[in-house]
Amino acid sequence: MNLQILVGTMSGNAESVAQAIQMDCADLVESIDVTLMDTVDLSVFDEDRAQHTLYLICTSTYGSGDVPDNAQALLSAFSADPRYLGHVYYGVIALGDESYGDTFAGGGRKFDAALQDVGAHRVLDLFIHDACSDVIAEEAGVAWCREWLPAALAAHPVNQAANAA
């Protein structure tokens, strides 16, 4: 099973978290690819690919709850070109600043809502990191991912079928 981390970032923080996961969680899956969102479209979720891939959305929040510039086209594609993604199993790491109140971690929450709307399966709750906390985002993201990945692997239909055989 592969892990595809799709990164939405303005300042590089989300990319740094994704790269830490790529380095520290490589023992849990066959491969981990980190891809900036501005280099992909909805075809990244194609059914053939999703049979052997788990998806992790790792995004910061920009402004008042918006997704970063490099993530806007991908997020917009969910409503502009809706397609059923019931074959997709994913998790979300949402970075933000709690002082923004209701829009805190809005980038990740928007991706989660968009994926839910097209039938994708979220595994576990979102991991939300507050930039104002004393917790280092990379360390916390890796710790969360080491819990999330086994749950996501167990939930994926390919692994369920293999375990049933």
Image: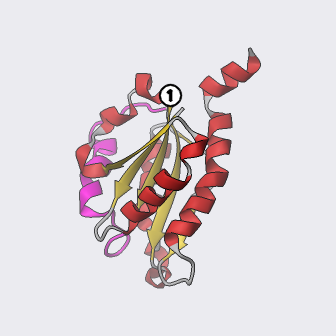
Q: What segment is highlighted magenta in the picture?
A: 60-85
| x and y, in percent, of residue 81 in the image | 28, 36
| x and y, in percent, of residue 133 in the image | 54, 83
What residue occupies the far right of the structure in this picture? 164
Could you say which quadrant of the image residue 126 lies in? bottom right
- Screen quadrant of the N terminus: top right
- Magenta span includes 66: yes
In the rendered view, would you say 86 is above or below 78? above
Residue designated by label 1? 52
| x and y, in percent, of residue 22 in the image | 47, 51
| x and y, in percent, of residue 41 in the image | 27, 40
Give the residue at x 39% y 34%. 45
Give the residue at x 43% y 81%. 100
Residue 124 makes an appearance in the image:
no
Type of amino acid under label 1: His
In-image side of 65 versus 142 (left or right): left
In the rendered view, would you say 20 is above or below 117? below
